[in-house]
Each structure stands twice: as structure tokens, then as C-alpha cells.
Amino acid sequence: MTDISQDPHATPARRIKWGRVLDHAILIVGSLFMLIPLLVVLQTTTTTDIETIKNGPELLIGTQFDDNFMKAMFKASGFSGENTGTSMLINSMILGLGFALGKIVIGMMAAYALVYFRLRFATFAFWLIFTTLLLPLEVRILPSYEIAQKLSLLNTYTGLIVPLIASATATFFFRQYFRSVPEELVEAARIDGAGPVKFFIDILVPLSQTMIAAMFIIMFVFGWNQYLWPTMVTTEEGMYTLVRGIKQLTQDLEGTNIPEYGRANMLALIAILPPVAVVIFFQSWFVKGLTESDK
Amino acid sequence: MAQISLQNLRKIYPNGFEAVQPTNFDIADGEFVVLVGPSGCGKSTLLRMVAGLEDITEGSLSINGRQVNNVDPADRDIAMVFQNYALYPHMTVRKNIGYGLKNRKTAPAEIEAKVQEAAKMLNLVEYLDRKPSQLSGGQRQRVAMGRAVVRDPALFLFDEPLSNLDAKLRHQMRIEIKSLQRRLGVTSIYVTHDQVEAMTMADRIIVLNGGQIEQIGTPAEIYHAPASTFVASFMGAPPMNLVEGRLDTGQVMIGDGIALGNAEGTGPVTVGIRPEDVELNDQGSLMFTVDLVEELGAHRLLHGRLAGQPFTVHVGKEVVVGAGDAAVNIKPDSIRLFDVETGAAR
């Protein structure tokens, strides 16, 4: 922050504010704590596996970056040869996007029904939806798997995404947001001849832009990082997502093979990038969505 | 253009509260009717029933002879201006004004022409591409007006449209709305709690209190011949003086036998006198004790007591008075009598 009230020509005796120094020290230590593992990953991707095994993490930057990248992206690790980095990246992308968009669409529509229509037991229905927060996937994984299997959704994108997208969180956030939209807006729209669908699409969705962006970030990252469900539902290597594919690689490290440190770390690096990109891209929207209401 | 007819219109909320008691009135084509009353008197509920935003519990509402009780707001051929404007925040002024037309499947070229026309009428042409958040309160109000005007409806409904504006702007918009309504000749119902707006804008005023109509009349009728003590004290600033008196031997008496005028009957009565119907006169027969002088520039208000009861007198700026006793006269034929029990005019 710049202090504009200060005369630039005056040279006041600058006192060191120890409180501020301490603040920064804490921040610096915190960011190092977060960054160092990442730097180790980055370093490992530049050296050969043998070097990594011999020397462990070093300060040296090697020359194998390209090589490791090619291996990670295009070499298959399984038997079928279908789970290359590229195919896993695509699968993860589909999962992340489908998961986020599905949750947003379902959550918005559920919230719309709860807030704007005089349903019987609307509040009860809302709390019923809300209590599903207490029943995450891990609790209901066996019945969920059974249903997916009976509907022959195993090893399909539908099976990967649909069982996950019912969302109490998104419904809750959109409900709270819709309730803050002034009622006169609905009434003005009614007089202007906008029916329920038009009001939703023409007015409510554009008004919720920032909220949608905020939800998208949270849900995309959440979907991208899904591990348990994809592990259960996908058995064909062509359907593997990055997060579970990396696990597959570390399994290869066991036994007598030369551990592929470079390749595994490269994949980890690649797996980090899309969520980071999404957060950076939507960041300002995210803050807006959670703090201010543009009404 | 439309005639509106309300027959025994009644509103009872699900919790059993009767917001509007059975109400009857007709509005003529092109008339500007103001519903006025204190907050919670049912005026907004009545308006919202006409708009179709509130269900009608009983009775019948017709616009141009067609019963519209169960007609969707969009199909009643009405336009409404809301207190907080209710503009769509994400749309430009142009789209805000044109939205109703777009939903009615009007051709884009025609929408554009009508929006331009409305914008010209309301001095909004240079703001057409702005968002509502970039406009001032008065401009937003005009956009809300534009949204109503552009559809060329049979009936305008205004729900306290000026109460979010500052005093100066309110005065200006009052005149603009009135002259616009005159020019377009559209039947209008205007809800307000501000009696000045009611007096200045209305062709006819409907005074509501506690969910029922106290009086219907032109501003002059309402002012000069209030139907009840409620109307007398609600309309006019300062309100009509109401003092306790009695009828005795053909005379209206207050205090210790001070006669104000002639009237038949006997027993106690509430006497209403407008502050400006009292004049200071050295030969006056009444003694008015001034406690406080309120200076308003164009005139002065003298607050004090007449025969021991609170009383206000309105005098011109040329009359200089200080605190103390002053002799006053009441203009002939200017006193109103009300029943002590019911408050109704006699």
C-alpha cells in the first residue's frame, strides 16, 4: 500500500516496525514450507533417475527435463499402453470440468426451486439436502459402486462424474445467494413477461456470475483431486485419471525396476498445473463472489 | 387507457391478518389516483393485488370490464415502478427498457425504435449503454419509468417511487411523473405515504387506514372536508387542529364557554380547524398563547395553546409575533365537527 498523504520530499526518520518484520518472517517461512517440496519435485524432473537414486535431492539442475517430459506425457506405464500422460490429462480434465459444471448446474437448479417456488416442505427438503454433507462418498461408496455397476457405468465418463455431482455445498451457497436477490427483481421480471425459465436464464444466471466462478474454482479443484471414486470405477487403463495414474507409477517403483523418479515427479508437476491455472484465472472473480454482491 | 373497477376486493394473509378490508372503487380512464396512508395501512397490498403480484382473497378486479383476478401480471397490460427501481443490474439501460418488449416477441428494430423514443422522452439517450450502477438515483428512477412507458400499457402502477430520492430530486420527479402521465393520458395508481405527493399529484386521493378506505375525493375535498379525524390529522402539514369542544344551545363551544360558531345538536364534539383558517387580530375574541414560533421563510407556524389545548396557527411572513398571548379570530365557516367516539365528520 502506498501512503499518498506523505510528502515525497520529506525524509522522515523511518522506524523499523518490528511487528511488520515479524509478519513478513512468518509469511516467508510459510511460503518456503509450501514451495520447497515443489522445488524438489521440479529439481527431480531435470535429472536422470540413476542420479536421483545416488545423490537424492540436489541443488543442481540437470538436463533431463525434456526427456522426462516426453516419457511422462507419451509413454504408457500399464500393460495396454493406453494410459499415457496425455490420455490421463484428458481424462482428468473431463472429470474436473464435468464435476464442476455438473455440480454448479444441479446446485443452481435445486436452489432455484427451493427459493423461488412455493414448494411444500421446501425448508425440510433443504435441510435434507444439507444433511448429505454428513454422508460423503467414502461413507456410501459400496452402494454407490453397486448402482454404478448395475447401470453398467463402470469405465465410462458418466460413471466417473454423475454419481459425484449432487452437491449440498453448491445448493447451499446458491440458496443463500438467491435469497439476497431483491424480491422486486422477480416481480419486475414477472410484469415484464419473463416466465420461470426466462427469469432463471436472463436474470438469475448472469447475476450469479461471480458466484458461479467461485463455485467453479472450488469444484474444479475438488473434482480434479478425486482419487477414491476414479480408482473404484475405472479399471481400464485408458480411463485412468492423472491422480490415480501417478499412483500406478509409484507401484512400478517396487520390485527390481529402476524407479522412474523423473517421470513420476514430472506427472505430479503436470497434475498441479491445471488447478493452479484455474485458480489464477478466476481469482478476482472468486474474491468478488465470496465478498461483494453486484446488485 | 383503461377503467379499473374494484369490487369488494379483500386480502387476508395465510396467517389470518386482514390487510385489506372489502374495498370498492372505480378509476376512470386517464385518471391519476393516489393511495395514501401510514405504513401498514394496506395501500401497497392493494396495489400489488391490482398488479397481480398478490393473490386476491375475495372480490373482483376488472380492467376495462375484463375480470383479471386470475390473470398473470404479464397479461394484465400494466407496468409498475418500484420503490427501489428493481432495475436488472447486469443489463444496460437499453436492455432494461427493452426487456419487456423482447419477452413479448417484438421485432428488434421496433424495440430499438421504441426504446429510443422512451429514452428521448425521459432524457436518457446518452445513458442507454450504461449499467444501472453507473447512474444516479434520479436517472435510475427515470429508467424505471422508461421501462414502464415503453410498453404503452393500459395502467401504470407506482409503488412509492420517489421515497429513495432526496427532497430536491423528489420535487422535480414529482412534476416529471405528473406531466408525463398527463401527456400519455395513461390511467395511474400511485401509492405513497407522503401526503404532499398525494395532494400535488392526484386527480383523486384515496386515504387508507388500517386496511379500509377513510375517504375518497379530490385533493381539495380531502383537505377542506376531511371525512374523519384520521384524514384531518394525516393530510396537511401542519395537520388540522383538533380540539375538544361541545355543542350547546346552537353554538360550538370550547374551553370555558368560548363560542366558535353555530351548529345544531348537543353533547361533546371534536372541533377541527386548519391552522391557516386562524388570523391574528387585535379585536379577536379568542386568546391564543404562543409558546414557540417556527420560522419557515415563506410563512411562520405559531405553536401554542387555545383554551388550554395544543393548537397551531399559520401566519404569513409579514406577521411578526413573539411568545406570549395574542388575540385571534377564526375565519367564518372554516370549522369542521367530528364525532368524539367514531371520529367521523358530522
Image (cartoon, coloured by chain):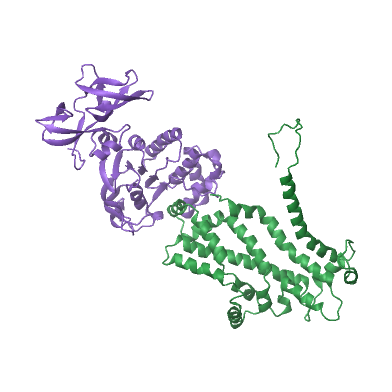
Chain colours: A green, B purple
| x and y percentages locating residue B125 in the rendered image | 53, 39
On the rendered structure, is B100 left or right of B69? right
Q: Is residue A270 above or below residue B247?
A: below
Residue ranking furthest to the front: A18
Residue placed most toward the observer, A165 or B259: B259
Q: Give the quarter of the image for residue B233.
A: top left
Question: Residue at 85% across / 63% down in the picture?
Answer: A43
- In the rendered image, which quarter is residue B248 located in? top left
- At which x and y percent is residue B57? 30, 57
Q: Quadrant of the N terminus of chain A?
A: top right
Q: Residue furthest top?
A: B282
Residue at point 80%, 76% (across, down): A76
Above or below, A257 relative to B149: below
Residue that lies at the very extreme toward the left in this rendered image: B249
Q: Position of residue B72 (x, y in %)?
A: 38, 57
Residue drawn where x is 89% and y is 61% of the image? A61
Task: Count how many numbered circles sit on residues in the image.
Answer: 0
- Is residue B217 in sight in this rendering? no
For residue A187, above or below residue A95: above
* x and y percentages locating residue A74 in the rendered image: 81, 71
Residue at image coords 29%, 47%: B210
Position of B307 with respect to B197 (left or right) is left
Nearest the viewer among B265 and A14 is A14
